[in-house]
Image: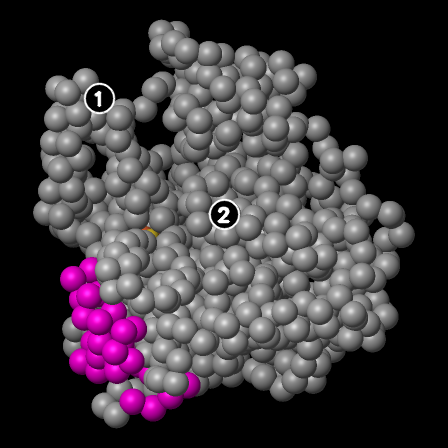
Amino acid sequence: MLSSLLAAQDELGYLPYEAVDEVSLCTGSSVNEVWAVASFYPNFRFTPPARHSVEICWGPTCHVLGAQPILQGLVSHLGLEGEGDTEDGSISLKYNTCLGVCPHAPAMSFDHELAGRMSLDEAVSRVERIRAADSAGEQQA
Amino acid sequence: MTEAYEALAKRAAARWDELHARPWVRVGTGLMGEAVGALEVLSALREAIERAGVEATISEVGTTGLCYAEPIVDVHVPDGPRVRYGNVRPEQVETIVQRHVVGGEPVTDLALASVDSNVPGVPRFEQLPMMQGQIRVALRNAGEIDPTDIDQYVARGGFSGLDKALSSLTTEQTLDEIKNSGLRGRGGAAFPTGVKWGFLAGNPAPQKYILCNCEEGDPGAFNDKTILESDPFTLIEGCIIAGYATGASNGIVFIRHGHDSPIDRTRAAIQACYDNGVLGESVLGKEFSFDMEVSLVGESYVAGEETALMEAVEGKRSMPRFRPPFPAAYGVWGKPSNINNIKTLSYAPEIVRRGAEWFAGIGTEKSTGTAIACLSGDIRYPGLVEAPFGLTVRDVIEGMGGGEPTGKALKFLQTGGPLGGVLPAEQFDMVLDFDEMVAAGAMFGSGGLIVCNEERSVVDLTRTLVAFDQMESCGKCFPCRLGMSHILEILERIAAGKGRSSDMELMERVGVNMRGGSLCGHGQLGYNPVASAVRFFGGEFETQLEEGAGALASFVGPKSTRRGAQMSGDTPTASVKPDFVMHIEAVGTSPPS
Ligand SMILES: Cc1cc2nc3c(=O)[nH]c(=O)nc-3n(C[C@H](O)[C@H](O)[C@H](O)COP(=O)(O)O)c2cc1C
Ligand code: SF4
Ligand code: FES
Ligand code: FES
């Protein structure tokens, strides 16, 4: 069940109702049982994600080397109150407990590509580059 | 020697010669490299070599452990020196290709170190401060070989331990080697591995599992993922040896869903083993069959706990089970199972190949072999080192790690992960040893060492660790679920300068109840970070409790997510029928028969 849910999340970026239903049918479990698993792991989200993903690590090494000012600065730059999606639907911001590259702390990831030795300025400029490319793409579309 | 291995070794040696007969460029493109631009360096390199029109091999390798010097490009030319270049930027690649790959002369001013050769003005790799004193056993191939090329692994002696076991040792003798080596688990509890294998060997069931734990949820630790990224074959060989010694039929490697590279590389290596008769029916032509696969686990720290991992594998929430029954009697899918950490299993090939005595000769009496430490924080050379037990913490932090980089004094070390503790700088002469460190209240755990200088606040770091532990509590038992929330609440008000004089005592009371009343190690050890911080730096808490104490910098982190998110009624639904259904069918959902 977990592997099916992970596959659906990877494929769609979130778990819609249909996915939960489908997994419940395929595994012979009740929707409640599937839901119990899906809501337990932070891997899953249940609404479509924004067009781009940004993750920021708040793990202990990143914390020691200055993740909090970046995290708080970025949250307010994006007009958010914490983890979540920006109003224009361009960025989903997610916190991570450790991105696994502690030697390069503070660490973030932009569209699933890791970036180390971050600063608030660098984080903001990367986010703005993503947004600029995003709105250029939107206009073309 | 088995005939199968002889053939494999012969082919590997020929391929090794071939690789060395023309320029060979290796780039560390693991997660560590990726985070600092190794992928850009790799594509610049491909273009430069194409433009230069030279015939050269480019391999993506794992990491040497010298993270501070990433991205690392390693250039070998026939009849010339081999040099590793550090902190390479894409714009430097052209020079390296023109002068070294084409011209055969190393670019000394960009060189980090020479390997197996002397270049005037360039230190040898093993003379770098970070490498001095290291003994590389589990990391022997890290950064050296393409992690998906079985020939490269075999050419460096890979699978000869397995071959030795299969051709000249009985299963009991193989088990004895592990027992006599004194190998202890590297996943946290340091339980003797041979004894654990013995439990499984004693169970006569026909189908038994070896589980390889790469959940690695410990923030600050990255050694398990790095082994899988750099040399998954050593884990595979160790797992097969465990299977042979215990009579198990299947191995499963659990990796946390998230980063692709350890998953992809391990899968590719397993496939290569099947293609070459090292896995599957009759391993190396012998009457012993063993199957392996990779299974993904959702993000959950507690999923690293052995029984929770089994629940996760079965597709459920990762909530620990009651024990007994223990895994060796009733494990995954109810089958007898043995669970080990990635590092633990990665030692087995060299132990069998070189003998138990060799391994037992490294380290201390009760902690044999090496410790794989992840250095990060306020340290000059952050990265991964493999140090023999018996060195002091100072040897590792100040010697290999190069000490504090900005000239400030070191204050303390956080060890043992989020359930571990702190070690003040006055105690850095402590010897690396499982038992000594536990006695000092700072377990070695899975090897994450977070180094902090005099400017870091212990109260602040403790708050972060507790926030993590609170968020990760699986929620099965209330002393842990509510206790962690309560302690976090108290710590937050202390940090905000609003603590009460009774708070220290209150936290301790909650902590004692958690230790006694929790089902798994998470709750039992959940008070550890606070207890250890208070033991060594109680004064900082007291100061923070004094009237008029200011607030520490504010802290934002997620609160418990395990209560279940809400699926709102107006959830938009997918507009097209998705093709994940195919995945579901392909992945399969029933237990293997
Ligand atoms: C809360 C919790 C989390 C754990 N996480 C891990 C982990 O991420 N990786 C790991 O190898 N062991 C982890 N362990 C330890 C495992 O339960 C188990 O002891 C270990 O995998 C056994 O391997 P070893 O004997 O080789 O050390 C964890 C234990 C607890 C209580
Ligand atoms: S101690 Fe905590 S993590 Fe462990 S089973 Fe209980 S609630 Fe879950
Ligand atoms: S703590 Fe941030 S990457 Fe590990
Ligand atoms: S040099 Fe790569 S883990 Fe570090």
Left or right of B303: which side holds B217? left
Q: Residue at x 61, y 50 (%)?
A: B271
Which quadrant is the N terminus of chain B positioned in? Answer: bottom right
Per the rendering, the mark at residue A89 is: 1
Q: Residue at x 44, y 26 (%)?
A: A11
- Is residue B304 covered in magenta? no
SS state under label 2? helix
Q: Residue under mark 2: which chain is it in?
A: B
Left or right of A124: which side holds A43? right
SS state under label 1? loop
- Is residue B113 covered in magenta? yes
Q: Quadrant of residue A110?
A: top left
Amino acid type of the residue tagged 2 in the rendering:
Asp
Q: Residue at x 65, y 41 (%)?
A: B310
Tell me residue B284's x, y (percent).
76, 62
From this viewpoint, which residue is outermost toward the right?
B204
Quick check: B563 above or below A62? above
Tell me residue B38's x, y (percent).
29, 57
Whether the residue under disc 1 has CB within 8 Å of ligand 3:
no
Work out whether residue B445 or residue B509 is closer to the camera in this orientation and state it: B445
From this viewpoint, which residue is outermost toward the front?
B53
Q: CA distance from mark 1 to mark 2?
A: 31 Å
Amino acid type of the residue tagged 1 in the rendering:
Gly
Residue B171 in view: yes
The boundaries of the magenta stretch are B90-119
Tell me residue B41's x, y (percent).
26, 58
Q: Residue at x 54, y 60 (%)?
A: B149
Tell me residue A83's x, y (percent).
27, 31
Give the labeled residue for mark 2.
Answer: B264
Q: Residue under mark 1: which chain is it in?
A: A
Work out whether residue B533 or residue B547 is closer to the camera in this orientation and state it: B533
Left or right of B474: which side holds A80? left
